[in-house]
Image (tube, helix red, strand yellow):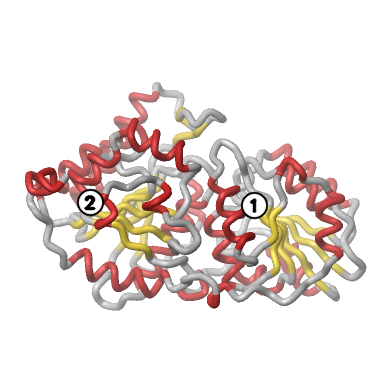
Amino acid sequence: MYSHDTQGLGHIRRNLLVAAALRRHGGAISTILLLSGVREAAAFALPAGIDCLTLPSLGKDTNGGYYPRSLTVPMPDLIRIRTSAITAALRSFDPDLFIVDKVPVGALNELLPSLEMLRSVGRARIVLGLREILDDPQTVRQEWERGEYAEALRDYYDRIWVYGDPKVFNTADEYGFAPDLVRMARYTGYLNPQDVGSNGYRDGEEEAAAWMSAGAEARVIGLVGGGRDGLSLAEAFLSADLPAGMHGLLVTGPLMPDDARASLRALAQRRPRQHVIEFVTDPSRLLNYADMVIAMGGYNTICEILSFQKRALIVPRIKPRTEQLIRAKCFAGLGLVDMLHPNDLSPVKLTAWLSRGPEEPPRAHEVIDFNGVGELQRLYDEVVNCGRPPAELIHAVE
């Protein structure tokens, strides 16, 4: 499995969930190697049979452009390093199945040599894995046309797996997939993290334990993803007036700058019923204790909230992509979450929402397809047993 990973931890967390789902298939899948573009991936607990190779990291600026996150080398050199590492790993690993996350050609086309190598060998099946929402349709269509992604899919790929439910967001229709790509697409349903179990959490054990053991009438948790762009929501969460008897816990994320995290801890010290921890690799146990959730709108966060049937207020990211805003609107329209636009964010708005208290939790299983884990196992069998027609026949169909 490959993910270029530049912003946050969503890609590695989703890939780990997919990997764990496939490992539960039984004896058919014994070994999975993750190729990740964020070094923070090494912090996650990996089940037996799954390991991770981290690539030198890329960063992404506010305009969506890439830059070397840590190494002081020119971008072409960094891409050559990453491309060499990916190709060498795939050649040695010799996979039965190669799952590429989101970008068919990889960041800055770094996957093309590997895809060509795998196709020349002819054994591995190749799948593109997509979260259900990438960005607004016009932006995605332009990106796919500019990057010639459809051509790459026809040349190298066997299937497209969409980790979602077309009743919520019809990915193929919204992004204008050509008929041959529609035939390649399979919707898995949303991925329920409880279907693969919890790996526990790391860091902040003392603060988390204090929050869980407090004699609280209600508990609210604040989640800001990796934390790189979550300061505004974090400050508003800690500044909100909690209803009597409620305790709050903020998870800042490991990518939040140190000075921002320090200011949040100072703010929490003045709020006796607020607690702050830095990082949890798996928030399942914390979500299980929570009565209410205030969070950004990443794919994994939404799936976790719905899995534990918690009442949630989503304050989505709107830059550099509108993915979270679209997702929040979709799920709010289905009555599964509440949404607050980040332009309207304030402690007063959060206080008003919290004052309503816990209500009847949404039952996502009754509204959406939430069986992605089981469906992935079926789709694995389908793709590894499929025959791939010759390239000339694919293009003839096109």
The residue lying toward the viewer, choosing from 105 and 273, is 105
Kindly identify the residue that appears in the image at 46 percent across and 71 percent down: 369
- Please state, as top left, top right, bottom left or bottom right, where the N terminus lies in the image: bottom left
Residue 133, percent from left and from top: 47, 51
**Residue neighbourhood size for the residue with mark 2, other residues' Cα within 10 Å, grouped as few (<14), some (14–19), many (≥20):** some
Does 245 sit left or right of 35 as displayed?
Answer: right
Nearer to us of marks 2 and 1 is: 2
Task: Name the amino acid, label 2.
Answer: Asp
- Please state, as top left, top right, bottom left or bottom right, where the C terminus lies in the image: top left
Spatial CA distance of label 2 from label 1 is 35 Å
- Residue 18 vs 100, above or below: the answer is below
The residue labelled by disc 2 is 180
The reply to whether residue 85 is in sight is no
Kindly identify the residue that appears in the image at 78 percent across and 72 percent down: 358
The residue labelled by disc 1 is 296
Of the two numbered discs 2 and 1 on the same chain, state the one appearing first in sequence. 2
Residue 201, percent from left and from top: 59, 65
Residue 53, percent from left and from top: 36, 50
Kindly identify the residue that appears in the image at 57 percent across and 57 percent down: 330
The reply to whether residue 49 is in sight is yes
Residue 130, percent from left and from top: 39, 53
Which numbered marker is on residue 392?
none
Does 332 sit left or right of 144 as displayed?
Answer: right
Does 27 sit left or right of 315 as displayed?
Answer: left
- Residue 121 vs 288, above or below: the answer is above
Mark 1 element type: loop
- Residue 327 vs 305, above or below: the answer is above
The residue lying toward the viewer, choosing from 151 and 203, is 151
